[in-house]
């Protein structure tokens, strides 16, 4: 089973004087996307991966919450979750969620009302990049997925919306944000931040898109049609799970200690076997691991034998006070 992880570039915190709508990098944008930040931890799937690993309570909580979501929005269809998994594997899709739950995996900010997953982006594991908002909406409609709450604002109104958010961002509650964004554009929503997280806002994420709102409109309508009949059931399930997390439900906590049915198994191979697997084959990564394995040999010999790989690396030779040498590298 192959495990893949893909990350959005870390967003920049904007100071009072900075606006995305006037940034040179946003030249040519046609739409501003405004979403609310949820207080949780990142989970990628399938298979489920979190906190730089798998088979831990963070990844297992994400799988449990998403399975519960599928159970709520696909009533009478126990195979829906498995079909979603197989579809993702077949097309090499890596889903990124914010996993939000009170207490059970630590506090990430304000204590949420519910325990739930929020889909923020999807990437092609083959390196083809992230899916567009339209593609994300299509997947969301097909699988009734819990997309994040997003306002799509025509670019000519982006500056005014940014100014309103900046003006009150230090004291704004969820209901204030809704009022500030009311009528500014089209809305994408499964469950709202206020229903699940509560009134305390952690912040906003703003994206400049090169797709016009008119092009997104039919995808937004199709998503709403697909999820609207199941919204109440999903919210009820998320609130029940939130209450269970908050009270430290023993059954739930015990379940997080048990491997799931499709959870990647930790390898029991020894050190030499692991090195052998990493060094086997051709290409840059096996060659690099062979170089690392031989790093105890003379540095000049390594440079001569693996010059092609080192030519793609940024190298620094660090001399600790205690003596010896440490080679720090970054693959270009």
Image: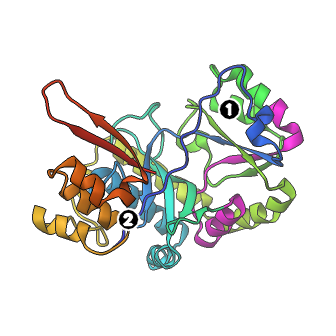
Identify which residue is drawn at 52% across, 73% down: 75
The residue labelled by disc 1 is: 175
Q: Is residue 44 left or right of residue 8?
A: left
Q: Report if residue 47 lies within the magenta region.
A: no
> In the rendered structure, are the residues bearing label 2 and label 1 in contact, judged by CB atoms less than 8 Å apart?
no
Task: Say which of 277 and 245 sits in front.
Answer: 277
Which residues fall within the magenta stretch? 132-161
Q: Nearer the viewer, mark 2 or mark 1?
A: 2
Q: Is residue 270 visible?
A: no
Task: Say which of 72 and 45 sits in front.
Answer: 45
Q: Is residue 170 visible?
A: yes
Q: On the image, which quarter does residue 122 sit in?
A: bottom right
Residue 247 location in percent, x, y? 32, 41
Residue 74 location in percent, x, y? 53, 72
Residue 312 location in percent, x, y? 43, 54
Q: Is residue 21 left or right of residue 267?
A: right
Tag of residue 199:
none
Identify which residue is drawn at 59% across, 67% down: 144
Look at the picture and state if 278 lies above or below 9: below
The residue labelled by disc 2 is: 284
Which of the two discs, 2 and 1, labels the residue nearer the N terminus? 1
Look at the picture and state if 120 lies above or below 16: below
Identify which residue is drawn at 12% across, 26% down: 322
Q: Report if residue 135 lies within the magenta region.
A: yes
Disc 1 crowd rating (10 Å Cα; few below 14, some 14-19, many 20+) is some
Quadrant of the rendering where the N terminus is positioned: bottom left
Q: On the image, which quarter does residue 321 sit in?
A: top left
Dominant secondary-structure state across the stretch colored magenta: helix
Disc 2 crowd rating (10 Å Cα; few below 14, some 14-19, many 20+) is few
């Amino acid at each position: 089973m192959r495990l893949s992880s893909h990350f959005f570039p870390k967003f920049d915190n904007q100071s009072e004087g900075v606006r995305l709508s006037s940034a040179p990098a946003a030249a040519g944008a046609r739409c501003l996307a405004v979403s609310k930040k949820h207080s949780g931890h990142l989970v990628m799937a399938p298979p489920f991966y979190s906190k730089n690993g798998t088979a831990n309570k963070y990844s297992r909580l994400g799988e449990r919450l998403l399975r519960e979501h599928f159970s709520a929005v696909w009533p009478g269809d126990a195979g829906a979750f498995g079909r979603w998994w197989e579809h993702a594997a077949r097309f090499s899709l890596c889903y990124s969620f914010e996993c939000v739950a009170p207490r059970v995996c630590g506090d990430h900010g304000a204590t949420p009302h519910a325990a739930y997953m929020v889909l923020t982006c999807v990437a092609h594991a083959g390196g083809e990049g992230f899916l567009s908002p339209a593609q994300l909406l299509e997947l969301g409609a097909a699988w009734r997925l819990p997309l994040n709450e997003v306002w799509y604002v025509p670019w000519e109104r982006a500056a005014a919306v940014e100014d309103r958010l900046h003006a009150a961002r230090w004291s704004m509650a969820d209901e204030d944000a809704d009022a500030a964004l009311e009528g500014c554009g089209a809305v994408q929503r499964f469950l709202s931040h206020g229903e699940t997280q509560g009134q305390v806002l952690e912040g906003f994420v703003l994206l400049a898109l090169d797709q016009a709102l008119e092009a997104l409109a039919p995808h937004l309508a199709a998503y709403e049609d697909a999820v609207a009949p199941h919204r109440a059931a999903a919210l009820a399930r998320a609130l029940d799970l939130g209450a269970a997390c908050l009270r430290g439900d023993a059954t739930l906590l015990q379940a997080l200690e048990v491997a799931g049915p499709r959870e990647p198994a930790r390898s029991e191979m020894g050190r030499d076997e692991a090195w052998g697997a990493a060094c086997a084959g051709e290409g840059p990564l096996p060659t690099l691991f062979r170089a690392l394995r031989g790093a105890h040999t003379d540095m000049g010999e390594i440079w001569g034998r693996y010059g092609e790989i080192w030519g793609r690396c940024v190298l620094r030779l660090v001399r600790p006070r205690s003596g010896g040498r440490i080679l720090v590298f970054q693959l270009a």
